[in-house]
Amino acid sequence: MTTNTNTHTISRTDALPGSGEKSEASIALGWLHTAKFLTTAPELHFLPALEVPEIAFVGRSNAGKSTCINTLTQQKQLAFASKKPGRTQHINLFSLGKQGLMDAVLTDLPGYGYAAVPKQDKIRWQQVMANYLVTRKNLMGIVLMCDPRHGLTELDEILLDVIRPRVQEGLKFLIVLTKSDKLTRSEATKILSITKLQAGGGDVMLFSATKRKGIDDVAKLLWKWAHPPTDTTVLPAPAPIQPPLAE
Ligand SMILES: Nc1nc2c(ncn2[C@@H]2O[C@H](COP(=O)(O)OP(=O)(O)OP(=O)(O)O)[C@@H](O)[C@H]2O)c(=O)[nH]1
Ligand SMILES: [Mg+2]
């Protein structure tokens, strides 16, 4: 008897396990709710090297990065959020994963562009951040938080230039237009389409922590980033069709 050793590969679908929009969002939110404080560091070289995918929240000071992390993880004080700009001053990592098995990390970064910060500190921080964004090996996605009342600012554009080579190599990229509760419906529609044009193919989503808007969509996208389809599932090939018996 000959054994058929041929194999072929199949692709998993893009959908989250489970069926329907509702369960996709609840799976993603359940995963995000597992977030736990992992570590904090003033500079990149103090961070532990990690194997799991890392997703960083970046953007201007006061844009709502820490609030967005708290909203997505459904935890009130995981990341430090504050009315006072410049609240986050370290690189803060939060681990994600069910049953304590870390399968991804969220990073909350200090914001840039806060006028009251001394010039030397601004320059130092810009270097720390650029260094992080360019060299962090396991960085697999960036969420750029943007207050749509200001749109993408010059500093956001500089950041986009810094990460462009990595985005071209496959780094995931999402612009979150936060505080969308401050916009009328038509303003929101307008800024969404303008930002999509500026995003160069990256995703753009409207978000509001206070009105709880966009949470499911952002959660589902982050889940998919961290759990890409594995197209290497190896299945035995179907048995070859036997030629008809000779008469
Ligand atoms: N109206 C409204 N306010 C928000 C929203 N998200 C955040 N805020 C407020 O914006 C302020 C700044 O929020 P943070 O989350 O601390 O902002 P951050 O980007 O982490 O700021 P830094 O750490 O300084 O870079 C706080 O007063 C939040 O309550 C939102 O969706 N809607
Ligand atoms: Mg913050």
Image (tube, helix red, strand yellow):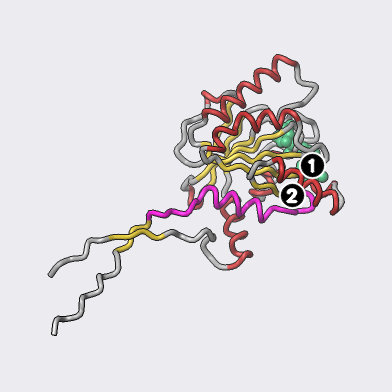
- Type of amino acid at the residue the image marks with label 1: Pro
Residue at the location (65% across, 33% down)? Answer: 160
Residue 166 is at least partly visible in this image: yes
Residue identifier under label 1? 148
Residue 221 rendering spot, x and y as whole percentages: 60, 51
Instruction: Please report the residue visible at 77 percent of the width from the left and 26 percent of the height from the top.
Output: 114
Query: Which stretch appears magenta?
Result: 207-232
Circle 2 sits in a helix, a strand or a loop, which is it? strand
* Residues tagged 1 and 2 counted as in contact (Cβ below 8 A): yes
Q: Residues within 10 Å of mark 1 (few under 14, many from 20)?
A: many
Residue at image mark 2: 206
Q: Is residue 101 magenta?
A: no
Ligand 1 is within 8 Å of the C-beta of the residue at disc 1: no
| Quarter of the image where the N terminus is located | bottom left
Q: How far apart are the alpha carbons under marks 1 and 2?
A: 9 Å
**Residue at image point 75% right, 53% down:** 212
Q: Position of residue 174 (x, y in %)?
A: 64, 44
Label 2 sits on what residue type?
Leu
Q: Is residue 246 left or right of residue 78?
A: left
Residue 210 lies in the magenta-colored region: yes
Residue farthest to the front, as pictured: 247
At mark 1, the secondary structure is: loop
What residue is shown at x 50% (from left), y 41% (from top)? 53
Expressed as whole percent of the image width and height from the top left, the position of residue 101 reads 46, 47
Q: Residues within 10 Å of mark 2 (few under 14, many from 20)?
A: many
**Image vertical order of residue 129 relative to residue 171, above or below:** above
Q: Is residue 18 above or below residue 104?
A: below
